């Protein structure tokens, strides 16, 4: 009986590890979204469309910041926002990240 439970638990564990995190889109789907994210779209709208980013980087400038949201692992898509104090962040650019060649 213990062996059956252990084998069943192992199968369940392997199944759970194979499932992508919630909101994570496959690389092909992320690439397809590039044309659907126009300049000026808000950060909230991007989050609704693509889900939470895998990584976030921010560069602080004089009265505003540039923020990069990275989607996919390895990185597939990079969305850059202009964050002006007191305003909703807006998309500046959307780029497909090219894979590093060996």
Image (cartoon, rainbow, N blue to C red):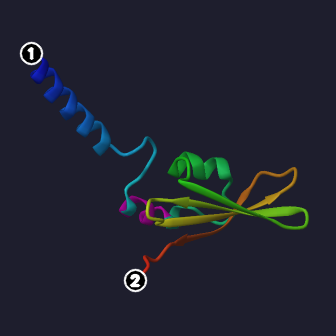
Q: Which mark is residue 81?
A: none
6, 62: nearer the viewer: 6
Q: Please provide the residue range marked out in magenta.
A: 28-33
From what the image shows, is residue 52 above or below residue 76?
above
**Left or right for 63, reference 21:** right
> Contact (CB < 8 A) between labels 2 and 1?
no
Taking the spot 14% from the left edge, 29% from the top edge, the residue there is 7
Secondary structure, mark 1, is loop
Q: Which mark is residue 1?
A: 1
Taking the spot 44% from the left edge, 60% from the top edge, the residue there is 73
101, 63: nearer the viewer: 101
Q: Position of residue 23 (x, y in %)?
A: 46, 44
Count neighbours of disc 1 (C-alpha within 10 A) and say few if under 14, some if 14 to 19, many if 20 or more: few
**Left or right for 1, reference 27:** left
**Mark closer to the chain start, 2 or 1:** 1
Q: Position of residue 56 (x, y in %)?
A: 63, 57
* Quadrant hosting residue 89: bottom right
- Report how far apart the C-alphas of labels 2 and 1 lie in the structure: 50 Å
* Quadrant hosting residue 91: bottom right
The residue where tag 2 is placed is 101
């Amino acid at each position: 009986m213990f062996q059956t439970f252990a084998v069943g638990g192992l199968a369940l564990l392997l199944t759970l590890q194979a499932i992508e995190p919630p909101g994570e889109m496959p690389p092909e789907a992320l690439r397809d979204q590039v044309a659907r994210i126009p300049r000026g779209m808000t950060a909230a709208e991007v989050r609704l469309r693509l889900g939470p980013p895998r990584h976030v980087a921010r560069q602080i400038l004089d009265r505003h910041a540039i923020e990069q949201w990275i989607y996919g692992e390895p990185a597939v898509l990079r969305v850059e926002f202009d964050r002006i104090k007191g305003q909703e962040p807006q998309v500046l650019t959307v780029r497909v990240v090219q894979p590093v060649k060996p």
